[in-house]
Each structure stands twice: as C-alpha cells, then as structure tokens.
Image (spheres, grey):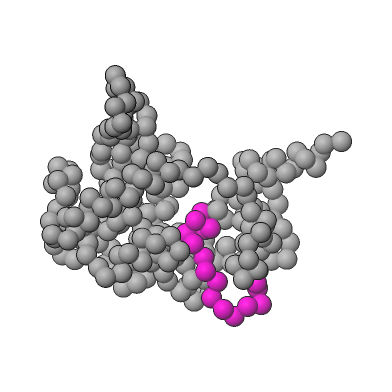
Amino acid sequence: MPRKSSLYDPKSKEPFKFSRTKLENFMSCPRCFYLDRRLGVKQPDGPPFTLNTAVDGLLKNEFDIYRKDAKAHPLMEKYGIKAIPFRHEDMDDWRNNFKGIQHHHAKTNFLVFGAIDDVWANDGGELSIVDYKSTAKKGELSLNEEWHAGWKRQMEIYQWLFRKNGFKVADTGYFVYCNGQKEKEAFNCRLEFVIEIHSYKGDDGWVEKELIKAKECLDGDKIPDYTEDCDFCQYHKSLLNIK
C-alpha cells in the first residue's frame, strides 16, 4: 500500500509529484491509474529487468568518458551525428529515478518529472534527448512495432520537460539500441551486443492535454469504467462473473 502522502488528494494545495510513467499509465488505462494514484490499489509489480539496467549503467559510464572530454562517441561519428554528450551540473539528478528533470505544471499543480538516460548537444547548443534500449532478438531492429509507441511518448515527455526548463531542444532524438547476440557457439562469460542508433522525430504537443485529462480523472469521485484492452481490467471483471 502506498504511503497516504503519495496518493492524490483533490483538496490538497501542495504540488502533486507526477512521473512520466504515471502519465503513460493513465493513457493506457484510466481505471487502473485512478485505482493506483487515488485509492492506492497498485497493479502487481513485474520482475525487475536487471540485465537491461546493467546495460544502461555501462552505456552511461561509457558516454560519460566522452562527456568529460567533450568529444563525440565513435557511435555518434559512425551515424553522422554532429553532437557531443551534453555536460551539465544537474546530469546526475536528471538520471535519478526519484528526481529526474522536473517541471511544475501550473494548470494541474502536478510536479511532472522523468529520469533520462542521456542528452547530446550540437554546435548550436540544441539538445537531443537520448534513450538507451536493449533487447535480444533475431532480425533487424526498428521502431515500427506497436509497442514502440510507448518509447516514443517517453522521449516526447522528456523533450517537453527540457523545453519547460528553458533548454533549446531538437525535435529529433535518438535511441541507442543494443541487441544481444544469442547465436554464439559458447557463452564464455561474455554477452556481446550489436549497437545501433535510431533517430526519432518527436512531437510533444499532446503532453499538456493528457496532463489535464489525467487531473480531471483524479479529481472525479467515480472510478472510471473498465478498459477493454487492459489485461488487469479484464481479469478483475472476470472475477466478478465467477459464480
């Protein structure tokens, strides 16, 4: 059960801390979102993606070497990206899952935040948001699967947050996409990856509208109806039909 202070109280005047993940949850299922943030009924946690987290950490360490030296990473040069890892005193906070980059959205009184992986800057001082992703699959990597829409929204929220903090942000961001190779003769205590950079042109015009909708949802006294394509909703609904 979440601490009572972490739940939304329509009568409170204090800014409500609101992660980009919670906005994504609202867009996926308003009912589950309301149960979580208003009533404290969370969905079961999935297993931790510890290998993905390890890859993220190693990539951050590697790009930080080039950040310190104000040089482009060889991957950036390979893909013709004329930028270098952005150096800023708040980088550690921006990467912190409990802090992230923040913006107080006055219309909703939400303190919106999200933890980024990386930021790159071009010669003109324009920033590109960068997200690290890892998988292990056959075939070519792409951003064309239906579930990649969540990745794209994630990047667009980060773009919105940086713009709200006064930074000049490029529409184009980058996914550093790591694909673990399974077709090796032996493990030999080594997992090898093919790493690609995929660009994505974002549009954050939807973010504020969805924040306002999320607040309207939380302000209501009625639990939203079941979402048809939500597995949790359908599970709960099926329990009610058991005789």
Q: Which quarter of the rendering shows the C terminus? A: top right
Front one among 12 and 153: 12
Front one among 213 and 142: 142
- Give the magenta-colored segment's residue range: 7-24
Write the residue at 39% across / 62% down. 96
Q: Does residue 205 appear in this view?
A: no
15 magenta-colored: yes
Write the residue at 55% across / 53% down. 25
Left of 11 or right of it: where is 26? left
Write the residue at 57% across / 55% down. 26
State the residue lying farthest toward the right.
Answer: 243
Front one among 100 and 233: 100
State the residue lying farthest toward the bottom.
Answer: 13
Q: What is the x, y in percent for residue 43?
A: 62, 49
Q: Does residue 28 appear in this view?
A: yes
What is the tally of numbered marks visible in this picture? 0
Front one among 114 and 208: 114
Up the image or down, 46 lies above or below 104; here it is: above
Q: Which quarter of the rendering shows the N terminus? A: bottom right
Query: Image quarter for residue 217?
Result: bottom right
Q: What is the x, y in percent for residue 177?
A: 31, 41
Left of 65 or right of it: where is 174? right
Q: What is the x, y in percent for residue 187?
A: 32, 26
78 magenta-colored: no
Write the residue at 17% across / 61% down. 68
Q: What is the x, y in percent for residue 28?
A: 56, 49
State the residue lying farthest toward the front.
Answer: 189
